Image (cartoon, grey):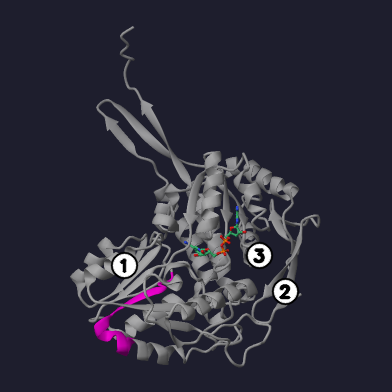
């Protein structure tokens, strides 16, 4: 098999197998070929991983942040050296085109190791608080054993975005990738170990929705960071609450992207396409409700159709391919069901909606799809589709579009395209979302906090803000004179 790892899990610095766990296959979405066979973690594997993490964490936390950072930066260097190999693995795991994975996946993971490895030495400092003679100081301390649970759209990136801030802060991590994409995180664990990370600090175990709760409910786990759907987020946050664990929730969205009449048309269309078709539409922050002001609607739609129909669909390993298959048959079926719903509820299918020509019949391919004349109440405008399906809605004025953009339970992201600087700022001020863009879409550099509000979650990944979610403060009051006691 093309991508068979030495064993299913990576625990305490080595590959570990337990064939008592349920067997499952990893499938290359472009051909349907089985590329690896793995086993889900048994309770014994879960115990082993958490015990290894717990054992290793104390000594790691006692090292200086600079020494910890050096190891993370070395891991970043190895990832960059092996970018091609890691990108090919990510393509096999997800079906995303190599054209994307080579620039967006291992590299963004490496960015996280480099950023947190570099900045944390200063960012983990505490405060000195003068109290007029007496004083206090704060220490930023790690939480202990942190669990990361990943989605299948950015497996390597998610493994690093959670691992880097957790590790630099002095925590240990047990990471469970999505059962759809089990391979990338194992390589990240291997690389961290090779870079000098002491064993036991970054463990990867396999499994699905039945394995996750074993981690979330474990008494030795201090924190859970989930990237997944809102439905899973509710379950995981609920379970974590029962034992008062820290949580970060990176969940789904139905984000608005607003295009005003004065916007640069080609940029706005480019942003909308990136925000709907990149990674075959499987991006949480996608701007799937594209609100276009009526004055440019016709021009917008005709150029959008033209550009969308030129997208090169095909073999994800071919350098020219711009759109690969969806991650799984189940996800493909779900997206086709939404397309049928869109048609049935009266939206206009501008382009796409079917299976492309000249692709492997076993691959889970779908054409990039645009619906026009979508209205707020339609199912395709309300629910997260998580596929390459763009909904274009039209609007008259600013107040109206802001109210409609905010009229959703989600609040992950939002974008605005306009040439009017003051309007751009006015609009982002009023949009209810955690991550916003002006005149671009979906850029998520490691320096900038990333995360959602409302039902899209809480907590932030990336940037110094992420360190708040992997540490807690200890406050120490220091008396400089005798105790003044009334007794
Ligand atoms: P999912 O919710 O089905 O699964 C996510 C992960 O949670 C998987 O590893 C799964 O095995 C695990 N899981 C499921 N039930 C669990 C439970 N009860 N306890 C513990 N773990 C459990 O999501 P998915 O289909 O893998 O990914 C798609 C979703 O993820 C979309 O909604 C998307 O918007 C969201 N997402 C969000 C972000 C973000 O940063 N906000 C990024 C990527 C994806």
Residue nearest the observer in this picture, 415 or 120: 415
Q: Secondary structure at mark 3?
A: loop
Q: Is residue 297 magenta?
A: yes
Q: CA distance from mark 2 to mark 1?
A: 45 Å
Above or below, 105 against 460 in this view is below
Compared across the picture, whether 193 is left or right of 453 comes to right
Q: Which mark is residue 182?
A: 3
N-terminal label among 2 and 1: 2
> Would residue 264 be seen by someone viewing this image from the given angle?
yes
Q: CA distance from mark 3 to mark 1?
A: 38 Å
Above or below, 363 against 208 in this view is below
Would you name the residue on which mark 1 appears?
A: 404
Q: Secondary structure at mark 2?
A: strand
Task: Pick the quarter of the image with the N terminus.
Answer: bottom right
Would you name the residue on which mark 2 appears?
A: 35
Q: Which mark is residue 136?
A: none
Residue displayed at 35% across by 73% down:
257
> Could you tell me residue 50's position as x and y percent?
66, 45
**The magenta stretch spans which residues?**
286-300
**In the rendered structure, are the residues bearing label 3 and label 2 in contact, judged by CB atoms less than 8 Å apart?**
no
Above or below, 425 against 9 in this view is below
């Amino acid at each position: 098999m093309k991508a068979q790892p030495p064993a299913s899990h990576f625990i305490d610095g080595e590959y570990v197998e337990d064939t008592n766990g349920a067997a499952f296959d990893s499938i290359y979405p472009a051909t349907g070929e089985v590329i690896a066979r793995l086993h889900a973690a048994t309770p014994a594997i879960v115990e082993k991983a958490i015990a290894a993490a717990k054992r290793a964490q104390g000594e790691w936390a006692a090292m200086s942040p600079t020494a910890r950072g050096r190891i993370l930066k070395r891991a970043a260097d190895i990832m960059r050296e092996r970018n091609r190999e890691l990108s090919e693995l990510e393509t096999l795991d997800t079906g995303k085109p190599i054209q994307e994975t080579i620039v967006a996946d291992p590299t963004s993971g490496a960015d996280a190791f480099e950023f947190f490895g570099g900045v944390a030495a200063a960012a983990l400092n505490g405060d000195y608080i003068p109290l007029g003679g007496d004083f206090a100081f704060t220490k930023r301390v790690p939480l202990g054993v942190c669990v990361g649970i990943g989605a299948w759209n950015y497996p390597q990136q998610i493994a690093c975005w959670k691992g880097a801030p957790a590790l630099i802060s002095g925590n240990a991590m047990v990471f469970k990738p999505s059962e759809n994409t089990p391979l990338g995180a194992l390589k990240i664990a291997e690389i961290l170990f090779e870079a000098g990370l002491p064993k036991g600090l970054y463990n990867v175990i396999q499994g699905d929705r039945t394995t996750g709760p074993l981690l979330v409910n474990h008494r030795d786990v201090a924190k859970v960071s989930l990237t997944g759907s809102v439905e899973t987020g509710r379950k995981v946050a609920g379970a974590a609450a029962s034992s008062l664990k820290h949580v970060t929730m990176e969940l789904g969205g139905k984000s608005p992207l607003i295009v005003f009449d004065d916007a640069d048309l080609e940029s706005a269309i480019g942003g909308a396409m990136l925000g709907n078709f990149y990674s075959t539409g499987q991006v949480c922050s996608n701007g799937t409700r594209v609100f276009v002001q009526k004055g440019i609607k016709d021009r917008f739609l005709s150029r959008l159709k033209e550009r969308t129909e030129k997208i090169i669909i095909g073999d994800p390993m071919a350098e020219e391919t711009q759109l690969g298959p969806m991650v799984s048959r189940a996800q493909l079926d779900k997206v086709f069901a939404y397309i049928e719903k869109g048609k049935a509820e009266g939206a206009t299918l501008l382009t796409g909606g079917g299976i492309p020509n000249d692709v492997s019949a076993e691959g889970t391919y779908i054409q990039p799809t645009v619906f026009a004349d979508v209205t707020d109440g339609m199912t395709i405008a309300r629910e997260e589709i998580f596929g390459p399906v763009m909904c274009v809605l039209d609007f008259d004025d600013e107040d109206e579009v802001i109210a409609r953009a905010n009229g959703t339970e989600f609040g992950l992201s939002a974008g605005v395209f306009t040439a009017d600087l003051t309007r751009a700022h006015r609009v982002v001020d009023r949009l209810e979302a955690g991550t916003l863009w002006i005149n671009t879409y979906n850029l998520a550099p490691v320096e900038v906090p990333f995360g959602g509000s409302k039902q899209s979650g809480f907590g932030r990944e990336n940037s110094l803000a992420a360190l708040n979610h992997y540490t807690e403060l200890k406050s120490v009051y220091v008396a400089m004179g005798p105790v003044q006691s009334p007794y």
